[in-house]
Image (tube, rainbow, N blue to C red):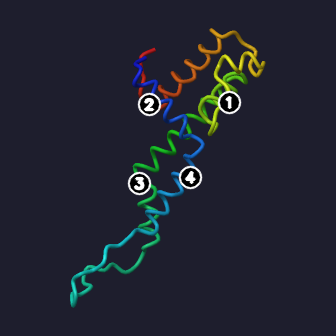
Amino acid sequence: MRLSTIRKVEDILRDYPKIHKYIEDREQELRYPVKPADDNVGGGKAQYKYGSQTLDILITIDDDRCINTLRRQQNVITDCLDDAGKDTEVIINELYFRKRPQYTIDGLIANHLINVSRRNAFRLKNSFIKECAKGFGLYDID
C-alpha cells in the first residue's frame, strides 16, 4: 500500500472521534444558511418560493456529499472496529483516537496494555489500516 494512502487513512482515523460533530455542524450550515445582504433596493420578490422549505432542507441534507462522505467514513471505521480484536482496538484507540496519546506501540507492550509481540502489534495496526482503506475505496488490491 502506498504511503500516501496510509497517511490519508490515518488522518481519517484521527478525525473519527470528531466526525459526529462535523456532521452536526454541516447539517446546521444547511438548515440555517447565511444569506448575503440584498443590495437590490426596490427590487421585487418574484423569485421567492412559498411552501415546503422543511422538505427542501431535508432533501439537501440527504443529498449533501460532505455529510454522506462523513457518514460513510464513520460506518467503515465502526465496522472495522467491530471486526477487530481487543489488542487492535487498544492500539487504534491509543494511537489515533486519543487527543494526546500517552503511549507508542512499544509503550503499550511495555506497560502490558496489549499482549502481543512488537511485530504482531504492527501487523495488527497495518491490517486495520488496510481494511479501512478498502472500506474507503482507497485500496482495492488484495
Looking at this view, is 128 or 75 the one in front? 128
Residue 51 position, x and y percent, is 40, 78
Indicate which disc residue 61 carries.
none
Name the element at disc 2.
helix
Q: Residue at x 57, y 34 (%)?
A: 77
Q: Residue at x 43, y 17 (%)?
A: 1
Indicate which disc residue 63 carries.
3
The furthest residue to the right: 112
Name the element at disc 1.
loop
Mark nearer the N terminus (3 vs 4) = 4
Disc 1 marks which residue? 102
Tags 3 and 4 touching, CB below 8 Å: no
Mark nearer the N terminus (3 vs 2) = 2
Mark nearer the N terminus (1 vs 3) = 3
Looking at this view, is 96 or 16 the one in front? 96
Q: Is residue 71 left or right of residue 137?
A: right
Residue 40 position, x and y percent, is 21, 83
- How many tags in the picture? 4
Disc 2 marks which residue? 8
Report the Cα–Cα distance between label 1 and label 2: 22 Å
Q: Residue at x 70, y 27 (%)?
A: 90
Dot 2 amino acid type: Lys
